[in-house]
Image (cartoon, grey):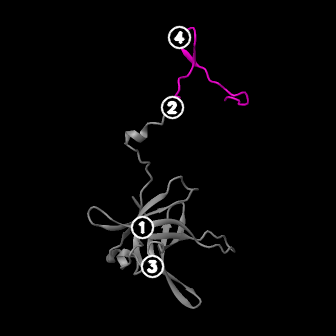
Amino acid sequence: MAQIGRVYKDSYIKGGNVIPLITLDIRTITVRKKFTISVNKIKFPEGKTVAQGGVPVQGKEDHPDYHIWTNLSNRGESLPSVIVGNIKDAVSENGLAYKRAKIFDPFVQEEAIYFTLFSVDADKKLDENHLYNVVAEPYRKMQNQDMQNSAPAQASYAQQETQQSYTKQDGSQIPVVEVDEDEIPF
């Protein structure tokens, strides 16, 4: 596992008002990118997660708790931000609270990029705005041990009615298939 970034409180000014936001800052050898984290308003219309006293909408309990947003505009463009990933609150078997996250970028790899957010102890924070450390582990393809799903499906071309066949000299059978004159058999 490697620490690839951090999450911190940030803000910006719009129309003279200071607007707070949560920033996910990922820095690796090949990429440095900042994302914005927001509460999933479909799951929590009030904008508060369960940890903040919010109640999820009935039927949306399995949806992510947060969305990861980014703006893909080039310089001079004004495109809207888009959701590129999500985050869910989780608790380990030992009772440690953490957040599971994933981002999908089809140009990086076919699978989603998974990482974890761990809260930072007060004595280890870089500053008062430092909320979480971002930890990632290399992707490993999961091997499904279920024998039912591991065997390839076999096509069955058996027909319900009895089919005529032609017996060759060596005793093997060749099925006789009736073809309409308008069809071209492949």
Residue 136 vertical placement versus 81 (above, below): above
Give the numbered dot on residue 59: 1
Discs 4/3, front: 4
Nearer to us of marks 2 and 3 is 2
Mark 4 or mark 3: name the one nearer the start of the chain: 3
Q: Residue at image x 40%, y 67%? A: 61
> Of label 1 and label 2, which has the lower sequence position?
1
Visible in this render: residue 35? Answer: yes
Q: What crowding class fits label 4: few (fewer than 14 Cα within 10 Å), some (14-19), or many (20 or more)?
A: few
Q: Nearer the viewer, mark 3 or mark 1?
A: 1
- Are dots 2 and 3 in contact, CB under 8 Å? no
Viewer-nearest residue: 154 or 3: 154
Instruction: Return the x and y of residue 28 as percentages of the image width and height.
Output: 50, 62
Labels 4 and 1 touching (C-beta < 8 A): no
Tell me the crowding category of disc 2: few under 14, some 14 to 19, or many 20 or more residues within 10 angstroms, Cα based. few
Measured in 3D between alpha carbons, the distance from the residue under mark 1 to the one under mark 2, in whole angstroms, is: 40 Å
Farthest residue to the bottom: give it: 16
Residue displayed at 47% across by 72% down: 40
Image position of 59 with respect to 52: above or below: above
Work out which residue is located at the far top of the displayed protein and give it: 169
Q: Nearer the viewer, residue 144 or 153?
A: 153
| Residue 34 seen in the figure | no
